[in-house]
Amino acid sequence: MRSYKVLTVCLGNICRSPAAQGILESIACKHGVFLELDSAGTAAYHIGNPPDSRSINALHQVGIDISHQQARQVTKADFNEFDWILAMDRENLSNLKKIQPKNSKATLVMFGEFYDHAAFGEVVDPYYGGDEGFTEMRKHLTNISDAFVHHLNSHQED
Ligand code: 4NP
């Protein structure tokens, strides 16, 4: 079975990308796709911290535990370590492009583009809002993750 190394990336690595990691892990497992996953932030604000409690709770409601994750900042080495680097929004994507080494291995894309092209595939940052934003984030990430795993299954990437 082909396996893929996948890094999900947002700004702080405490809300969206840890949730994306947990959801992808769960969906890939159900579809027999083997993913080695990690997540990171473009910013250094929360290095070493667990995910935001609102993200932990939103995922706990669907039986996914992300409480063990620890925030870290993305590095240039990640671009040769991972097959896919999945950015949550345009700002993340732009900041990642700035540090992407030439001819690196990873395919760098907006995660949301696998699901819908509306709002340019962005996963809205829920950090400054209420709990309902985290529920919306979980639903959006679940739809995108389904589409991404389907993409991997149907394209059989080398
Ligand atoms: P994330 O959300 O990028 O989805 O982890 C944020 C977390 C923290 C901050 C901003 C966004 N912050 O400004 O500290």
Image (cartoon, rainbow, N blue to C red):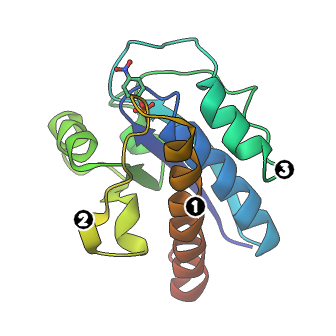
**On the rendered structure, is 43 left or right of 143?**
left
**Residue corresponding to mark 2:** 119
N-terminal-most mark, 2 or 1: 2
Q: Which mark is residue 63?
A: 3
Of residues 8 and 98, the one nearer the viewer is 8
N-terminal-most mark, 1 or 3: 3
Alpha carbon separation for disc pair 3 and 2 = 29 Å
**Type of amino acid at the residue the image marks with label 1:** Lys
As drawn, the residue found furthest toward the bottom would be 154
Q: Quadrant of ligand 1?
A: top left
**Type of amino acid at the residue the image marks with label 2:** Ala
Alpha carbon separation for disc pair 2 and 1 = 16 Å
User: Please, is residue 92 above or below residue 154 in the view?
Assistant: above
How many other residues sit within 10 Å of disc 2, few (<14), some (14-19) or many (≥20)? few
Picture quadrant of residue 110: bottom left
Contact check, label 3 and label 2, Cβ < 8 Å: no
Of residues 22 and 155, the one nearer the viewer is 22
**Residue corresponding to mark 1:** 139
Which residue lies at the image location 56% right of the left edge and 88% below the top edge?
Answer: 154
**Type of amino acid at the residue the image marks with label 3:** Gly
Picture quadrant of residue 60: top right
Q: In the structure shown, which secondary structural element does the residue marked by tag 3 occupy?
A: loop
N-terminal-most mark, 3 or 2: 3
What x and y, as percent, mark residue 156? 56, 82
Q: Which mark is residue 18?
A: none
What x and y, as percent, mark residue 129? 42, 34
**On the rendered structure, is 133 left or right of 110?**
right
How many other residues sit within 10 Å of disc 1, few (<14), some (14-19) or many (≥20)? some
